[in-house]
Amino acid sequence: MNTNRIRLGTSALFAMASFSLVIAGFTDTMEGTEDEREVDWKACQRRHAHASSQVERVRAAYRACVTDSDCVIVDTSTYCGGTCGEVIHRAGVQQMRRVISHLNATVCRENWRMGCPYGTPACLASRAVCARGECTSEAAATSPGSALPADEPGALPTCPAAR
């Protein structure tokens, strides 16, 4: 019993030390903390708005559908900000991923480098559906006594984090 406590205590100590080293290494690579540098809020907003407009452009191009199975929820979080995802036709998933990758490598990378704020909204569990010929989302059915969605195709319980 004592041996197990010592092993667990030692493991916890090593884990904390490793985490501290990772954090220390990360802070050394930053160009300064938020307090030490001035953030250009208008530039942050412009880049975030540009990223959002590019995501919206793809969503608009791939919103038409015939059945629920045509529609999927795709992660649209970028380094500019987190999202709850967008519902699009499954044919547009690769295009959306390409746009997100491009934004992360360009516009949103600059946002991150400049210390712009990052946020992710609270997201409700939802599922992709086709309503009146357009892909959209609706509240996902939940299991009794649970806040998690039931096993449904296209269900998204929480927002993904981009960072």
Image: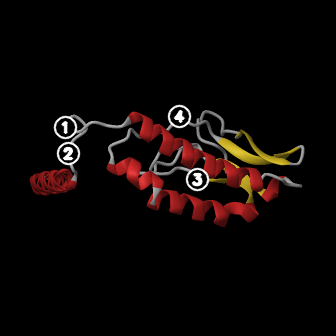
Could you give the CA–CA distance between mark 1 and mark 2, rounded to whole angstroms?
6 Å
Is the residue under label 2 in contact with that under label 1 (CB below 8 Å)? yes
At label 4, counting other C-alpha atoms closer than 10 Å, the crowd grade (few under 14, some 14-19, many 20 or more) is few
Residue at 33% x, 51% y: name it.
113
Between marks 1 and 4 in the image, the one whose residue lies nearer the viewer = 1
Q: Secondary structure at mark 2?
A: loop
Q: Does residue 78 show up?
A: yes
Q: Secondary structure at mark 3?
A: loop
Percent of width and height locating residue 102: 52, 62
In the picture, the disc for residue 122 is 4
* Residue for badge 2: 32
Is the residue under label 4 in contact with that under label 1 (CB below 8 Å)? no
What is the three-letter code of the residue carrying label 4?
Answer: Ala
Could you give the CA–CA distance between mark 2 and mark 4, rounded to whole angstroms?
29 Å
Could you give the CA–CA distance between mark 3 and mark 2, rounded to whole angstroms?
30 Å
Give left or right: position of 103 versus 10. Answer: right
At label 1, counting other C-alpha atoms closer than 10 Å, the crowd grade (few under 14, some 14-19, many 20 or more) is few
What is the three-letter code of the residue carrying label 1?
Answer: Glu
